[in-house]
Amino acid sequence: DAGITQSPRYKITETGRQVTLMCHQTWSHSYMFWYRQDLGHGLRLIYYSAAADITDKGEVPDGYVVSRSKTENFPLTLESATRSQTSVYFCASSTGEETQYFGPGTRLLVL
Amino acid sequence: GESVGLHLPTLSVQEGDNSIINCAYSNSASDYFIWYKQESGKGPQFIIDIRSNMDKRQGQRVTVLLNKTVKHLSLQIAATQPGDSAVYFCAENRGYSTLTFGKGTMLLVSP
């Protein structure tokens, strides 16, 4: 049971480049989430999705785009990366009413 | 003892001691609470949850206490082990299938 996976685990990119972070879950959970984690801010919600083709903004959505064409995948795209988007990104999934289960994270460095 | 570190409050204990990690939440309408453990370089891991109609819930070596009057949540870890060293987050569900996370407390266990 793979659970929830993220790729890549580490990424270095340059300012202005487009970057896509991938998230895949095998539980058929309806809800999926993207968070960023920064020192001093804890976990902040970027976007979430209640089902395929349904997405909604979280606390810090600016500069990010998401899509959800399939239940199991929820990619996060930084259309034009900025240094302030250097962070650790976590994907999570849930049935919608209870616990969220997290992936291992992607460490992104924008130079 | 407990101290405020550069970024996170830190609780330092000796192996075998009982640990108590505290969390204040803000929304009296929150009806579901979760404690997560995050080890260095990993994603948050579910520990235990509690619903607002309960005051206490016990798991293996862990107990969560909920005081709705003062909007306070605590996590008690019995016989703390070095493997318990991690950052611990509380999270509250305000009823929209999304969670709001606290900033976390770092637990350091000395052998």
Image (spheres, grey):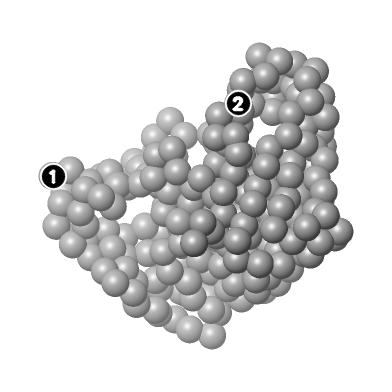
| Mark 1, other Cα within 10 Å: few <14 / some 14–19 / many ≥20 | few
Which residue, given by chain and number where applicable, does mark 1 sit on? Answer: B111
Identity, as a three-letter code, of the amino acid under mark 1: Pro
Q: Residue A87 carries which label?
A: none
- In the image as oriented, which residue stretches furthest toward the right? A53
Percent across and percent down for residue A30 are: 71, 67
Q: Distance between the residues labelled 1 and 2?
A: 36 Å
Q: Mark 1 falls on what kind of element?
A: loop
Mark 1 chain: B
Residue drawn where x is 74% and y is 41% of the image: A76
Q: Residue A11 carries which label?
A: 2
Residue in the foreground of this view, choosing between A51 and A62: A51
Percent across and percent down for residue B27 are: 65, 66
Residue B30 visible here: no
Residue in the foreground of this view, choosing between B49 and A10: A10
Q: Nearer the viewer, mark 1 or mark 2?
A: 2
| Mark 2, other Cα within 10 Å: few <14 / some 14–19 / many ≥20 | some
Residue drawn where x is 43% and y is 38% of the image: B41
Q: Mark 2 falls on what kind of element?
A: strand
A18 in relation to B52, above or below? above
Quadrant where the C terminus of chain B lies?
Answer: top left
Percent across and percent down for residue A107 are: 56, 31
